Amino acid sequence: MNQTSSSLALNGSRLVRFLSDLNVSDVAVSHKHFIEKLGRFINITDSITLAHVLSRPVARAFEPDETAGETLKQTFVQARSAMVQTIAESFASAEGGARIRLPMLSVEKLADAKTAYEPYHRFYAAHQREFEQKVAGLHTRIRDQAAGLSPQLAQLAELDRVLGNTLSGNFRKFYAVTPRLLGKRFECLLGDYLPTAPSGDGYAEWIQPGGWLARFFREMNGVLLAELEVRLLPVLGLLEAVDEQFPGSVQAMTAE
């Protein structure tokens, strides 16, 4: 595995490590028997389809493009930056113009432990819907551009498309677990601090630096960024493949 692959593998586990650090996940990360685990999500029909993609000859003309790596790099960096900016803006101010805005709750609403987390769950889920749409669009653009560069990349792009369609349902189930785990963290913090709820505008006090709610917001922000990283890994995989034929672009990108 080259240096880029090593760094991507490390980044790929960031979400699980982040949740583990919050003491809300007991998932053990292991690469042992990876193929067997992946095979559980692919049925016989899917296997036949994948085999057909691998055996089918590519019948199209290709023109080598030495600038392809840089072009794809810029497409990726711009899209990723826009998604990171969306996350930042959503936390910046509930009064701002962001389409997804962090909920501001009163002490009374936060005091109801059964429903207090629901607005934050909806907030996180709104970001997940945004991720799914934006990453899918980026993935398609990168895949389509890569497919026109060489027969090998065309075959890889088709395999990527089929495999992505096959596993998309399982990915949605996995991602749906993340906000529920964050809910456990929220309940833990709320249970520790609610008995000492301040009088007056407790919310304003809790979101000050060092406040428990400010801590939760910071942690939720970190989990969102980590999930975005994981969602982008298949796109980075395509860029790595392009880099094999047009060296240098992916390494430069991951260093930014």
Image: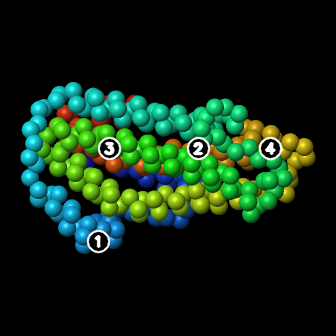
For mark 3, what is the residue? Answer: 140
Disc marking residue 221: 2
Q: Earlier in the sequence, mark 3 or mark 2?
A: 3
Crowding around mark 3 (Cα neighbors within 10 Å: few <14, some 14 to 19, many 20+) is: some
Residue type, label 1? Asn
Residues under labels 3 and 1: Cα distance?
24 Å
Q: Are marks 1 and 2 in contact (CB under 8 Å)?
A: no
Disc on the earlier residue, 1 or 4: 1
Which residue type carries mark 3? Thr
Numbered badge on residue 43: 1
* Distance of label 2 from label 4 (alpha carbons): 18 Å
Q: Are marks 3 and 1 in contact (CB under 8 Å)?
A: no
Q: How far is mark 1 from mark 4, CA to CA?
A: 50 Å
Residue 136 placed where, x, y %?
39, 46
- Structural crowding at the residue carrying mark 1, measured as other residues with C-alpha within 10 Å and reported as few (<14), some (14–19) or many (≥20): few
Q: Amino acid at mark 2?
A: Asn
Q: CA distance from mark 1 to mark 2?
A: 36 Å
Q: Can I make out residue 63 in this image? A: yes
Give the quarter of the image for residue 210.
top right
